[in-house]
């Protein structure tokens, strides 16, 4: 059986990832692809339990940056072994709302953890299971925060960070896209929904053609 493809969507809060996820699903289903949608942190029962701890912990002691990093990768290890790998092996495609690039952007850029420490965990846990295609939905920090606020849902532990945190997160995402432009496709997500979807559609057309 032909192995499925792994597509990931990255970007800061409010960039439009979840909106794009639905669009990508509709596109792939129309193209006759069997697709499984998932997210990080999360995607399996155990990974979702870790997500709760990561995003909604009310413990007064806080979560140290290294703890956050290790929990992200613990959640990812489970996600890969229980969901991503078996789904790809079964010939289905996986579309994930965030994946490994987010650890570099958030725990590296945002929290300031050295990139070589993240890269060590990347080698240990992801072990080369990199996305075939990544959409980076790029918006300035202010716009992302404003969109997330307009949505009106309560902010999780990470979403409560200040603008400069998201400026650093965005910068690492952009550096990674520049270093790997074949895989990480930059989307101007400041534009209206229709124009964002046009960019995504063009890239998917090309990706499907080449697959
Ligand atoms: N291109 C766009 N133009 C204007 N508004 C948009 C656009 N894309 C998404 N939105 C709106 O912005 C809000 C945030 O979008 P969405 O929830 O998809 O972002 P997200 O990246 O998934 O955020 P989070 O990281 O918080 O999950 C939603 O209310 C959505 O309807
Ligand atoms: Mg979302």
Image (cartoon, helix red, strand yellow):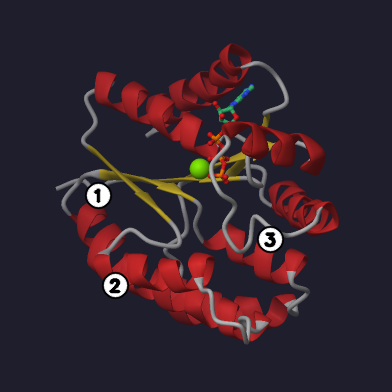
Distance between the Cα atoms at labels 2 and 1? 25 Å
Give the percent coordinates (x, y) of residue 190: 73, 26
Q: Would you say the beta carbon of the disc 3 residue lies within 8 angstroms of ligand 1?
A: no
Of residues 210 and 55, the one nearer the viewer is: 55
Residue 113, given in percent of the width and then of the height, sits at 73, 78
- Which mark is first along the chain, 3 or 1? 1
Which numbered dot is residue 105? 3
Which tag, 2 or 1, sits closer to the chain's start? 1
In the image, taking residue 1 as reference, residue 75 lies left or right, namely right
Secondary element at image label 1: loop
Residue receiving disc 2: 46
Q: In 3D space, how far apart are the residues under numbered discs 1 and 3 (Cα atoms)?
A: 28 Å
> Which residue is labeled 1 in the image?
3
Q: Distance between the residues labelled 2 and 3?
A: 23 Å
- Label 3 SS: helix
Q: Residue furthest right?
A: 164
- The answer to whether residue 186 shows anywhere in this view is no
The quadrant where residue 25 appears: top left
Q: Which of marks 1 and 3 is in front?
A: 3
Q: Nearer the viewer, mark 2 or mark 3?
A: 2
């Amino acid at each position: 059986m032909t192995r499925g493809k792994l597509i990931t969507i990255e970007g800061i809060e409010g960039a439009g990832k979840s909106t794009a996820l639905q669009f990508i699903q509709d596109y792939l289903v129309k193209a006759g692809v069997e697709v499984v949608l998932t997210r990080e942190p999360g995607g399996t029962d155990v990974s979702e339990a870790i997500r709760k701890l990561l995003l909604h912990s009310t413990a007064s002691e806080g979560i140290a940056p290294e703890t956050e990093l290790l929990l992200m990768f613990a959640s990812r290890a489970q996600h890969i072994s229980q969901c991503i790998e078996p789904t790809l092996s079964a010939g289905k495609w996986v579309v994930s709302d965030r994946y490994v690039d987010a650890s570099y952007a958030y725990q590296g850029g945002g929290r300031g953890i050295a990139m070589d420490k993240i890269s060590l965990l990347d080698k240990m846990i992801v072990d080369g299971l990199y996305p075939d295609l990544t959409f980076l939905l790029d918006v300035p920090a202010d716009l992302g925060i404003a969109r997330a606020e307009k949505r009106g849902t309560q902010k999780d532990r990470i979403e409560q960070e200040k603008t400069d945190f998201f400026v650093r997160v965005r910068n690492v995402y952009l550096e990674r896209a520049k270093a790997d432009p074949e895989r990480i496709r930059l989307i101007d997500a400041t534009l209206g929904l229709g124009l964002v979807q046009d960019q995504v559609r063009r890239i998917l057309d090309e990706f499907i053609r080449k697959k």
